[in-house]
Amino acid sequence: GAVVSQHPSRVICKSGTSVKIECRSLDFQATTMFWYRQFPKQSLMLMATSNEGSKATYEQGVEKDKFLINHASLTLSTLTVTSAHPEDSSFYICSAQRRPVRADTQYFGPGTRLTVL
Amino acid sequence: GESVGLHLPTLSVQEGDNSIINCAYSNSASDYFIWYKQESGKGPQFIIDIRSNMDKRQGQRVTVLLNKTVKHLSLQIAATQPGDSAVYFCAENWGNFGNEKLTFGTGTRLTIIP
């Protein structure tokens, strides 16, 4: 199956700093990537949809100025958590959509555990 | 719908027995539904999907049932193995072509007892 990677897998940062998380589709081109957030023992919540070469579409309640998304190429999307606070601590998961668009062609990354002190 | 603040339901099953995991969805306009398996510290892994115009679909050791009348989805895992221990999520796909997105259900933690 297709492979999606995330980097870093874990990151600890101080409150007020910014953190960048990368999502890469390793063996296919993804015109669409998605960013999810998952709090402990909870479900995945879609944060935003990222299309290559255009602005991301954010879900209601997600601050676009706080969670900056850049999808500069067909294999890379980045999520930057700006001015991170302890409440931003979470498991961030990306997924990449491969064509043809089907239920089994959206591939998830392994996630990034963010801890804000 | 959202599940903020809820703890994951749990299900313990003896190895070799069958398990049934249930899910309620909210959007009657969803065009297909997916079951994912998530192991600890990893991203979701696709198991099986079913289109909204179907009521049953079978895969290898798994069967998904869809009841649109009551907006209910179930995943049956036959002859469970220790490797089946994980959290299972249902997800519904909806939206206009090119703007589809997934909404995940609460999730169920399945534990296989050796």
Image (cartoon, helix red, strand yellow):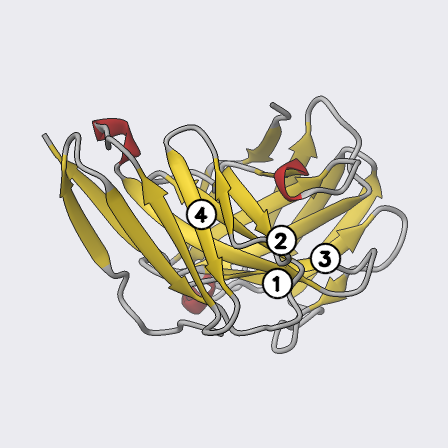
What whole-number distance in Å separates the C-alpha atoms at marks 3 and 4?
28 Å
Secondary element at image label 1: strand
Q: Position of residue A66 (x, y in %)?
A: 64, 67
Q: Residue under mark 1: which chain is it in?
A: A
Q: Amino acid at mark 2?
A: Trp
Q: Does residue A37 show up?
A: yes
Chain where mark 3 sits: A
Determine which residue is flagged by label 3: A49
Disc assigned to residue B25: none
Q: Residue at x 49, y 68 (%)?
A: B25
**The disc label shown at residue A35, or none:** 2
**Gap between marks 1 and 3, in whole Å?**
7 Å
- Residue B44 image offset from top left, x and y in percent: 47, 42
Q: Marks 3 and 2, how far apart in space?
A: 7 Å
Residue depicted at 15% across the width and 32% down the height: B15
Q: Are marks 1 and 2 in contact (CB under 8 Å)?
A: yes
Seen in the image, is A46 located left or right of residue A50?
Answer: left
Q: Which residue is mark 4?
A: B64
Q: Determine whether A101 is above or below A49 in the image.
A: above
Residue B100 location (% of width, % of height): 73, 59
* Residue for point 17% across, 30% down: B16
Q: Which residue is mark 1?
A: A47
Secondary element under disc 2, as helix, strand or loop, is strand
